Image (tube, rainbow, N blue to C red):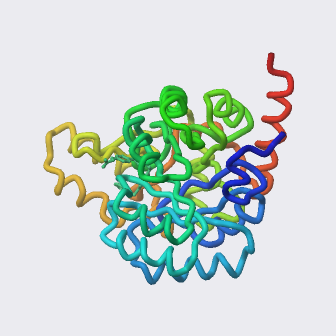
Amino acid sequence: MRKTAICDLLGIEYPVIQGGMAWVAEHNLAAAVSNAGGLGIIAAANAPYEYVRDEIRKTKELTDRPFGVNIMLLSPHAEDVARVVVEEKVPVVTTGAGNPGTYMKQWKEAGIKVIPVVASVALAKLMQRAGADAVVAEGCESGGHIGESTTMTLVPQVADAVSIPVIAAGGIADGRGFAAARMLGAQAVQVGTRFVVSKECVVHPRYKQQILRAKDIDSVVTGRSGGHPVRALRNKMSREYLRREQAGCEFEELESLTVGALRKAVVDGDVDYGTLMAGQIAGMIQEEKSCREIIEGMMDEAESLMNRAW
Ligand code: TUI
């Protein structure tokens, strides 16, 4: 009942995949999610390939189960990281913020399961043609870099457009979200913000606290003017960013605000000037839980909801 086609494809127990959150998704979180029966993901983000190789090896020390690496395609190190995942025989790769077409052949030849994150039907179709094993359809409720469509509208349209499995992302943090995603045509969910407030997630406690304190309307999207919209919790930095954006400031002047800001949030716990990336579902998250409690709670709740659905 709890298994879907994705579980056999990836060799996992539950159809729950962790988001590849920059700076947040390191080996401790990835291994905890995989050990709890989901698919843990290491975020390569903008990191050099040596760091990613080290994170992969640390994850392998903590789990015998499958895990993945998320490659952020805007990274200057994307090409090197694309090679490292092959060398390290990483079972699954997810990608974000671009089209991974140029890397598909080398990953498929290495036997890697490739799951691009898409924000449009067009990219989903392109990825299917390029040999992707599944796609994550990520709605703009998500934290971080987002597209235009909501999860509610994107997931069924992507599910209609491709025959490979679809994984829903954006606004999913409990069994209700999981059940809804299944009804929209998804075989699995990708969960980000909920895992930031997990016991095994090593971000600064103040980052977690801001998510716990957040209400439904406490996230904002900056960077729309530059074509790279990013959702994060509202704070002094996002307010200043939006002020400059509305005043018509140049991209460079805006970006000077955000340099190193994710590190400030995750490592230093700077809740005023760090970028606290989080999705709109932050307002629903009320307590820190272990990754196992999050995944099993989601499965239990979804199962009982779907059993009594008419
Ligand atoms: O990639 C994400 N989420 C991210 S990446 C990130 S790091 C970053 N920080 C600042 C600016 C930019 C990146 C933080 N969060 N999610 C997957 C995702 N991919 N969302 C949207 C897209 C996307 C957008 C445009 C994918 C492809 C695309 O264009 C495709 C093309 O043809 O180039």
Residue at point 35%, 72% (across, down): 79
Number of marks drawn? 0
Residue at point 38%, 68% (across, down): 46
Residue at point 62%, 31% (across, down): 185
Residue sitting nearer the eye, 58 or 68: 68
Q: Quadrant of the N terminus?
A: top right
Residue at point 81%, 28% (across, down): 305
Quadrant of residue 100 in the image?
A: bottom left
Whole-percent x, y for residue 227 in the image: 25, 44
Whole-percent x, y for residue 97 in the image: 37, 52
Q: Is residue 223 left or right of residue 179?
A: left
Whole-percent x, y for residue 282 in the image: 58, 42
Q: Is residue 153 left or right of residue 202?
A: left
Whole-percent x, y for residue 107 in the image: 48, 67
Judge whether 202 appears above or below 120 on screen.
below
Residue sitting nearer the eye, 174 or 217: 174
Query: Do we see residue 195 in this rendering?
Result: yes
